[in-house]
């Protein structure tokens, strides 16, 4: 657990073709997280395109688009977004495929234990936070190096004009 991390600042998108599952998920976890829900892959992709989403957790078996396909598309559009599969089916082959192809960070079985899933969601947000923090620090370091290089090139020009 990252001390002082505001988990509500990192939204979660829950995708399930069963509207009731979306409502239950939101009721269970909206006390600690910012929750968006979608009942299909296209709706989920629309949300990902317009909102900064830290974690997408998707049901595997949905009529218009499987969870694996959805998460692969999320990975293409937003590679830093943490992706998880949740399913009631013993569809272990699809889960293994998704994990091996890098589409998912975690596989969660239904029915899920609320406390365990809460911890998994926290871990996903923490991973997203650390990825973004690494990117921020890298950009900051590059900018600092550019400033130093500009100062050094200015000093070289001044020295060369003075003949030293």
Image (cartoon, grey):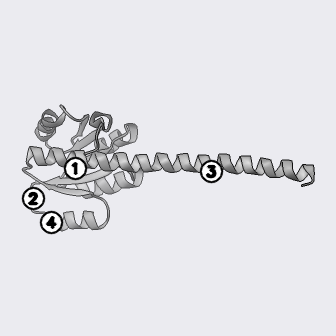
Local SS, label 4: helix
Contact (Cβ within 8 Å) of mark 3 with mark 4: no
* Cα–Cα span, label 1 and label 3: 41 Å
Q: Which residue is mark 4?
A: 92
Q: Earlier in the sequence, mark 2 or mark 1?
A: 1
Q: Residue furthest right?
A: 163
* Cα–Cα span, label 2 and label 4: 8 Å
Tag 1: Cα neighbours inside 10 Å, few (<14), some, or many (≥20)?
Answer: many
Q: Earlier in the sequence, mark 4 or mark 1?
A: 1
Contact (Cβ within 8 Å) of mark 4 with mark 1: no
Taking 9 as reference, is 105 above or below it? below
* Cα–Cα span, label 3 and label 4: 48 Å
Does residue 126 appear to the left or right of 113 in the view shown? right
Which quadrant is the C terminus positioned in?
Answer: bottom right
Q: Earlier in the sequence, mark 1 or mark 3?
A: 1
The label shown at residue 89 is 2
Q: Nearer the viewer, residue 113 or 90?
A: 113
């Amino acid at each position: 657990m990252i001390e002082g991390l505001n988990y509500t600042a990192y939204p979660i998108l829950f995708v399930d073709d069963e509207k009731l599952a979306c409502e239950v998920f939101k009721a269970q976890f909206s006390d600690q997280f910012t929750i968006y829900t979608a009942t299909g892959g296209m709706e989920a992709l629309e949300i990902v395109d317009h909102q900064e989403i830290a974690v997408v957790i998707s049901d595997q078996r949905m009529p218009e688009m499987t969870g694996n396909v959805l998460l692969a598309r999320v990975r293409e559009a937003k590679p830093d977004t943490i992706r998880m599969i949740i399913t009631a089916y013993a569809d272990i082959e699809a889960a293994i495929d998704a994990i091996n192809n890098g589409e998912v960070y975690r596989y969660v079985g239904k029915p899920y234990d609320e406390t365990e899933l809460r911890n998994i969601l926290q871990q996903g947000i923490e991973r997203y936070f650390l990825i973004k923090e690494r990117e921020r620090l890298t950009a900051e370091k590059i900018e600092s190096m550019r400033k130093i290089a500009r100062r050094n090139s200015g000093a070289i020009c001044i020295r060369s004009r003075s003949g030293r």
